[in-house]
Amino acid sequence: MSDTVDINLRVNGGDHTVVAEPRMLLSDVLRENLHLTGTHVACEHGACGACTVLVDGAAVRSCLLFAVQMDGSAVTTIEGVTPDEGKLNAFQQAMQDQHGLQCGFCTPGIVVSMTAYLADHPNPTDDELKDALSGNLCRCTGYQGIINAARQAAGLPTSSERAH
Amino acid sequence: MSTAITAGRYVGQAVKRLEDPRLLSGRGRYVDDVQLPGMLHAAFVRSSIARGNILSLDTTAARALPGVHAVYTGADLNPRVLQFWHTMLGPPVELGGQSVYPPMLPLADGDVRFVGDPIAIVIADSRYIAEDAADLVDVEIEQLVPIMDVEISARNEQLVHRERTTNDVGSMAQPVVPEIEAMFAAAPHVVTRKFRQCRATNVPMEPRGMIAKYDRYAGDLQIWAATQSASEWKATAARLTGLDEHRVRVIAGDVGGGFGLKMMMTRDEAAVVMAAHLLCDAPVKWTEDRRENLISANQAREETVEISMAVTADGHIMGAKLYIWEDVGSYPAGSGATASMAMGIFPGPYKFPVVLPGNTAAFTNTVGKAAYRGPWMMETVAREQMMDHVAREIGMDPLEFRRVNILHSEDLPYTNCMTMVYDKVTPSETMEQALDMLDVDAFRAMQTAARAEGRLLGMGMSVYLEPSAIAFGILASDQAIMRMDASGKVSVAMSTGNHGHSLETTIPQIVAEHLGCDIADVVLIQGDTSSSPLGPGTGGSRSAVIAGGAAQTASLRLKDKILQIAAHMLEAAPEDLEVGGSIVSVRGTPAKALPFGQIAAVAYMMPDMLPGDMELGLEVTARYRPPGQFTWSNAAHVCTVEVDSETGMVKILRYIVSEDCGRMINPMVVEGQIAGGVVQGIGGVLFEYMPYDSAGNPLATTFMDYLLPSAPEIPDIEVGHIETLSDSIGGYKGMGEGGAIGSPPALANAIHDALAHLGVHPTNFPLGPWQILDLINAAASDKREEHV
């Protein structure tokens, strides 16, 4: 099982050639070979969304892909979604404003998913936002702060704004 | 809605979390993110049989696989264990303590006791190779009939643990008291119901995980762990290996949720410690995968409660008989049984003249019982459903039945019939606030109109008291080690950890408030035994009261020393000084002022400028123990639902919580804790169910079977606050578990309310679509039979 292949990946704008076994998951290559540990692995069967990354701009579960399948692709991880200079993007800032995270483990997957979703859907309805979040499991927040963060980033009223 | 007390500059403010930018940008440091030179990876060989004898165990092929460093079995590791018990629970009876433990050793040896029981641990260059090798371990197991039912287990016909003479772990017979029997016999109403919760599990999004490295030459064991309590793990690892405790260091870093699962070291984790200790010099990492987590990480809520309640003609509770059955599985932490606690707080917010308790707790061939957010919460789940069942049976409105029996402020302090003393609680006030937020009359009108259209709407509520900050043993206190650097910046070290509780923000809020500095000038150091004190860690709704109390006490001590130095430098009396914005000034003479940085520089580096007898430096410690064994918080939950009679699906329409957690340090964090708990509780009623088949096979081993709530199922949760100060310093109360305690019965009662007129009176969880359809169909068939 030790046969390795060269895998060419463009990750967060930089080119990498990774030498890895063909059975290596994209999530493992990102975390172990490229030390991009912001991509979290929480179920390894595509159900929880914690490992979400963008491949050529589309949100995918990196635990369900072999890295070798991604040869020649452009991958964006949470590290790449985050602006440089220590700043947060609009959805990340909304997550802090609305208390959208507690332990933070599911958070990178949610940030990647929703950053991509909001870029593609600038005027979602409230129900569409909840549906967009349905692919990401969170055990801490009860989704309240995450939904409100999505509302803030989409320009919809948050729960406290609606209550008044 | 709130009845708030005056917020301070920081305490009481919704300060945005200081830890968020790190976690939002993927820069957190969870244990699986740690990569060390020469690091090896572990994988377990686990039993696929619930109960059986290991006939043969051959690791030859696994050991021969290139990249494999070791394959250890129970015969290799178990004899090397010196002791295996938890500081929180104390030593086992055999070692002179009072706690009942299962016969805990890291790996199965000779026989297996649940599906998932670890049989061998493989150490290899990568997890991939370790799993390959695990598949090559040849295990032959003679299958025995598993003990899957707690009542069968209690009869002791077969033993789960052959080292013991009984499966019992602390059952207590229900006393027979002639006077109470006579009271029940004469009571106008006696209602009896049996309520069942279903097995659910903590499921932190980050599974268990750790790295252990034993350096022979340094003589040190270093552990990086996903744990709620580095102190607990440090002591446990020392006892396991026989190393002196000061030779063990545990580092927690960011932890991806715990909910009680990561408080105490489990057998799997002990196996990694022992394997690394035996292997020597190489770091060994184990990261649990989700299948392992759902099969072999401890679980909870396998509980049944029977209540008989005697009630007067006008709805006053006369007394209750209570019996609790707990399936503690095979290897719970300690006995796993929480019945004694549940009995003590069963009366909750109501006046019960008497409660006669009894319980059965016994091992089964299932995974062990975990402490899961509100481990004793079955008392509220059963009592609050019972309040509705009794009210309906005696023809009272469930809200009115509660109002007749609930405690009011004039009843306080109140000693319940189980000798628990309540004070500074507001059950009646929270109940009425929650009902006002709903507008009960408007809901009843909407319900009636909907029913006329054939739609099923219902409302339910629950009221409870939460025994926060339980203060016994190692849990009774925490310490703050506080230092102001020579530049005037403050660090405070505590035993707590970061797994979602926001302490990196709330502890600095308390320190900045009471020291008089900017919050940016304070940092919390936690989760590393080399820098943090010995203490309880984070869990059990404890940190606000106990850690907060220590931080506040230390802040006041540090401030006192700062004022003494400033008074000396300014030639003023300390009582004439005031502090704000990290500056000490003479009251009324703002020009006479010194910034903290200048005072701190003097404190460390200019001994001649200090008062003559003063010790140099600005370092203080404070260990805080709350005044009571319990710091009671309380809440009331109200929930409305619509049940689809065609599909059995439950849609939650509104969810309302009114809570009293004393002085809120950060209302945003309080509401976040409530919401998270509420949704875990909702999960345990509608979605989450971990069934076993009769052969002992767990049937929900992925997130496609074990269903967690997701965003579309959850409504906006509305929260009202009442702030009644506790007797602890600062007036804080713990509230981390309450959401998960109050929501299951509120939701169950709402479903009951929606279906009661059909003759449906649910008592068992889960209440998923097919269970609800079964109940509706059974009730309809009962009605048809009545007509025949």
Image (cartoon, rainbow, N blue to C red):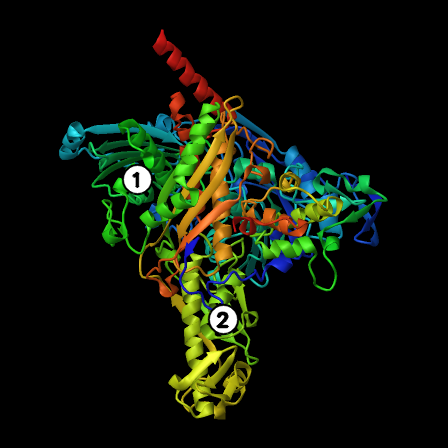
Tell me whether marks 1 and 2 sit on the same chain: yes
Determine the image quadrant of residue B750.
top left
Residue nearer the viewer, B556 or B79: B556
Amino acid type assigned to the residue bearing label 2 in the image:
Ala
Q: Residue furthest top?
A: B788
- Residue A124 at x, y = what percent? 68, 43
Give how far apart the Cα atoms at labels 1 and 2 are.
42 Å
Tell me if mark 2 has few (under 14), some (14-19) or many (20+) residues whose alpha carbon lies within 10 angstroms of its own.
many
Q: Which mark is residue B512?
A: 2
- Residue B608 at x, y = what percent? 49, 93
Residue nearer the viewer, B674 or B657: B657
Give the residue pinned by disc 1: B402
Q: Residue at left 24%, top 41%?
A: B352
- Residue B22 against residue B392 in the figure, above or below: below
Q: Quadrant of the N terminus of chain A?
A: top right
Mark whose residue sits in front, 1 or 2? 1
Q: Which mark is residue B243?
A: none
Amino acid type assigned to the residue bearing label 1 in the image:
Arg
With B533 as the anchor, is B33 left or right in this view? right
- Residue B480 against residue B656 in the figure, above or below: below
Q: Residue at left 63%, top 48%?
A: A156
- Residue B741 against residue B231 in the figure, above or below: above
Determine the image quadrant of residue B434.
top left
Q: Are marks 1 and 2 in contact (CB under 8 Å)?
A: no
Residue nearer the viewer, B674 or A11: B674
- Residue B354 at x, y = what percent? 21, 40
Tell me if mark 1 has few (under 14), some (14-19) or many (20+) residues whose alpha carbon lies within 10 angstroms of its own.
many
- Residue A123 at x, y = what percent? 70, 45
> What secondary structure is found at the residue carrying circle 2?
helix
